[in-house]
Image (spheres, helix red, strand yellow):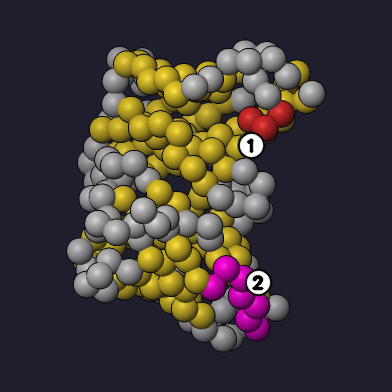
Amino acid sequence: KNEVEQSPQNLTAQEGEFITINCSYSVGISALHWLQQHPGGGIVSLFMLSSGKKKHGRLIATINIQEKHSSLHITASHPRDSAVYICAATRDSNYQLIWGAGTKLIIKP
Amino acid sequence: KAGVTQTPRYLIKTRGQQVTLSCSPISGHRSVSWYQQTPGQGLQFLFEYFSETQRNKGNFPGRFSGRQFSNSRSEMNVSTLELGDSALYLCASSLAGSYNEQFFGPGTRLTVL
């Protein structure tokens, strides 16, 4: 079993819909990262959080430490949000980043 | 502030050859991590360097090696290339490690023929 699990693997939605991507982890962590990868390879860090909630524009990231779960929400989704969203966790024991498999999001106009 | 740069962006090699990829981190960042990404696979961690020392290493054969210089620039080397080494190689820099925000370079796309 992977230490970081993401769901769903693939998500297709209509423009304007509210999107939720989930990430659960099974080890002790000191930080949780959400990143975005567009076709062509470039990866951009969206959030890094260790507790609570962060918001940037239409993106919101939350983490529940007790439940070992994090969510990434996109409000009023737009076709330009189409990308792969990846969650990664900083493992407490060796500070290595462990990666989820990614969620491929397609927003249709 | 300049971002993370990687050179070259594209590379074509033949089996058995060796290759060296370069990563220049953001100024002031001391940690550089390397990843391999193949189609359909997630990011596979290669190694992390901090202050010229390898701090973490993934599960790759000894053909994959790296180093970091005093100016934090890092290189990775792959010797005796195999077809399966064809991939996008990404480096990420951060202030001090994985508990800081990660900044990724554009990647080097390596094709082994």
Camera-nearest residue between A80 and B113: A80
**Residue B11 in magenta stretch:** yes
Report if residue A71 is visible in the image.
Answer: no
For residue B66, which numbered disc appears in the image?
A: none
Q: Residue furthest front?
A: B1
- Residue at the image position 71 percent from the left and 29 percent from the top: A79
Where is residue B47? Give x, y as percent. 36, 60
Residue denoted by label 1 = A83
Q: Which residues are magenta?
A: B8-14
- Residue at the image position 41 percent from the left and 67 percent from the top: B23
Q: Are marks 1 and 2 in contact (CB under 8 Å)?
A: no
| Residue B41 vertical placement versus B99 (above, below) | below
Where is residue B69? Give x, y as percent. 26, 73
Where is residue B40? Give x, y as percent. 65, 48
**In the picture, residue A66 is in which quadrant?**
top left
Report if residue B15 is visible in the image.
Answer: yes
Q: Chain of mark 1?
A: A
**Residue B93 in magenta stretch:** no
Which three-letter amino acid code belongs to the residue tagged 1? Ala
How many tags in the picture? Answer: 2
**In the picture, residue B99 is in which quadrant?**
top left
Q: CA distance from mark 1 to mark 2?
A: 24 Å
Which three-letter amino acid code belongs to the residue tagged 2? Thr
Where is residue B95? Give x, y as percent. 26, 50
- Residue at the image position 52 percent from the left and 83 percent from the top: B18
> Tag 1's secondary structure?
strand
Q: Chain of mark 2?
A: B
**In the picture, residue B63 is in which quadrant?**
bottom left
How many neighbours does mark 2 have within 10 angstroms: few (below 14), some (14-19), or many (20 or more)? some
Residue denoted by label 2 = B111
